[in-house]
Image (cartoon, coloured by chain):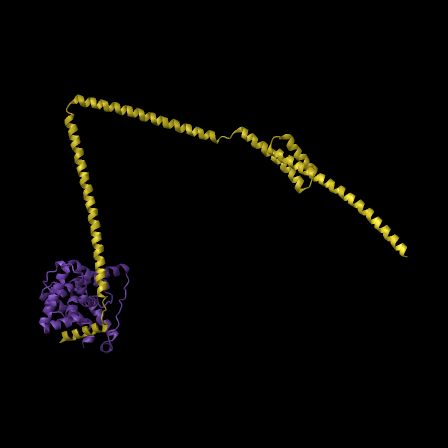
């Protein structure tokens, strides 16, 4: 699940591999710009898992983020020619994902208000027995609700920092905020989560 | 320390939620391409529609400009008042003649409408001769029908013959008189047949009686000779 986290660790431990990855992405983008259709397929293949995981986390593990993934890659397809390699391709895709999730969230809120019904989100099946032992359904729901109830501007840093395990600079790049602002948001988010998860924290 | 704890809890929850299985990369790529194609097509259509709208507006503006120029020319030419007056007179006479023509056409239209109305009324009035004929037919039919009822339903043959004869007498040329004649012919035939059959019957009876007398006599003679 923590693919990005693994990537992050890999990047930290092996900078050469990260650089290779960057050049690989650059080559893919260049091929796409030259009209090679398979390059886009390769990009989707490489990043769809990460994008899906991030979208799922940002949307509070709703378990139905296919539309968001499609929107993310559609926007990427349309804007890839304008990509200037200021950041890595992954960071760029994550930025799109964050924006799409915000839009999706907004639409969902409006729809829920209109329908005046609270639709229950679909739950995913627990991963494995060892994780099950560590956490039961009730606790998971508690954590999920706590994350869900966070305002978007606090939820995003939490997800990107603690679940995606991205570096501060990457998060700043994705959210387009300064590092101080990120620290403030993370601190406030932690405060809110501590209130909600006080029992679990003991 | 607390941050680590919180991180652990969040990551445990994340692991508990399980892996999110993203759709196949080729499916996503295919979907993206189809949406891009649709977007491009819509874009082309919108562009074509806006281009057409711009073209229409331009043509409209140009036409308005041309009309203005023509008016301006007339104004320049109209400096000659006499010419203008003559033109006005000519136009006036044209208008008058047009008015007369229009009025004539309207009058003609009106008279045509009245004529059509009268013709329709006339057509709706029934022909008196046809009416009388219809009544004659009806009377003849009633007499023949009466005869039929007496003949077929009540077997009053003489009364029926009387009715048929009356129909023939009063309306000899009518089609019902023909019917009455055929009925009389039929009755006559039946009467003749009846008479014939009666004669045959009588003859038969007489022969039968004679034959039975002869047979009885010969039988008694035969029994007497035996005895």
Residue at (68% x, 34% y) in the render: B162
Colour of the chain lettered A: purple
Residues A117 and B129: in front is B129
Does A121 appear above or below B86? below
Report which quarter residue A114 is drawn in.
bottom left
The number of numbered badges drawn on the structure is 0
Quadrant of the image containing the N terminus of chain A: bottom left
Residue A188 in the image: state x and y as whole percent: 14, 68
Given residues B6 and B188, the one toward you in this image is B188
Figure quadrant of residue B200: top right
Q: Position of residue A10 (x, y in %)?
A: 12, 73
Evaluate whether residue A37 shows in this view.
Answer: yes
Q: Residue at x 15, y 72 (%)?
A: A6
A196 is higher (above) or lower (below) than B164: below
Looking at the image, residue A13 sits to the left or right of residue B93; the answer is left
Seen from the viewer's position, the closer of residues B162 and A23 is A23
Residue A129 image position (x, y, % from top left)? 25, 77
- Determine the image quadrant of residue B106: top left
Q: Is residue B34 above or below residue B61?
A: below
Residue under the point 64% across and 33% down: B167
Q: Is residue A174 visible?
A: no
Q: Quadrant of the C terminus of chain A?
A: bottom left
**Apparent side of residue A195 relative to residue B126 in the rendered image (left or right):** left
B39 vs B179, left or right, is left
Query: Chain B hue?
Result: yellow
Query: Is A103 located above or below residue A147 in the figure?
Result: above
The picture places residue B101, in percent across and down from the top left corner, at 31, 25
């Amino acid at each position: 699940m923590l693919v990005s986290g693994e990537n992050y660790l890999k990047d930290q431990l092996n900078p050469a591999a990260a650089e290779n990855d960057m050049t690989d992405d650059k080559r893919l983008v260049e091929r796409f710009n030259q009209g090679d259709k398979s390059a886009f397929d390769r990009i989707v293949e490489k990043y769809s898992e990460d994008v899906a995981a991030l979208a799922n986390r940002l949307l509070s593990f709703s378990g139905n983020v296919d539309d968001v993934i499609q929107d993310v890659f559609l926007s990427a397809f349309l804007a890839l020619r304008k990509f200037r390699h200021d950041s890595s391709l992954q960071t760029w895709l994550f930025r799109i994902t964050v924006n799409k999730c915000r839009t999706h969230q907004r639409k969902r809120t409006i729809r829920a208000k209109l329908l005046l019904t609270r639709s229950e989100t679909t739950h995913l099946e627990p991963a494995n027995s060892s994780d099950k032992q560590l956490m039961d359904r009730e606790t998971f729901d508690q954590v999920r609700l706590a994350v869900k109830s966070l305002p978007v501007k606090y939820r995003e840093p939490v997800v990107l920092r603690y679940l995606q395990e991205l570096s501060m600079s990457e998060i700043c790049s994705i959210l387009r905020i300064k590092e101080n602002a990120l620290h403030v948001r993370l601190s406030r988010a932690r405060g809110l989560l501590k209130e909600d998860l006080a029992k679990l924290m003991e | 320390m607390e941050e680590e704890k919180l991180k652990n809890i969040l990551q445990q929850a994340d692991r508990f939620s399980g892996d999110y299985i993203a759709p196949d990369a080729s499916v996503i790529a295919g979907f993206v391409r189809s949406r891009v194609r649709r977007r491009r097509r819509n874009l082309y259509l919108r562009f074509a529609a806006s281009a057409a709208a711009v073209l229409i507006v331009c043509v409209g503006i140009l036409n308005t400009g041309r009309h203005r120029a023509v008016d301006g020319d007339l104004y320049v030419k109209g400096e000659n008042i006499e010419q203008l007056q003559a033109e006005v007179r000519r136009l006036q006479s044209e208008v008058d003649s047009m008015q007369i023509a229009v009025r004539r056409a309207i009058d003609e239209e009106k008279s045509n409408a009245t004529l059509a109305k009268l013709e329709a009324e006339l057509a709706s009035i029934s022909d008196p001769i046809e009416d009388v004929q219809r009544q004659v037919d009806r009377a003849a039919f009633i007499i023949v029908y009466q005869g039929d009822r007496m003949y077929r339903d009540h077997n009053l043959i003489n009364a029926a013959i009387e009715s048929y004869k009356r129909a023939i007498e009063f309306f000899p040329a009518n089609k019902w008189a023909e019917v009455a004649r055929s009925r009389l012919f039929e009755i006559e035939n039946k009467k003749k047949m009846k008479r014939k059959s009666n004669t045959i019957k009588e003859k038969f009876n007489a022969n039968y009686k004679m034959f039975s007398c002869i047979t009885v006599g010969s039988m008694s003679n035969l029994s007497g000779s035996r005895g």
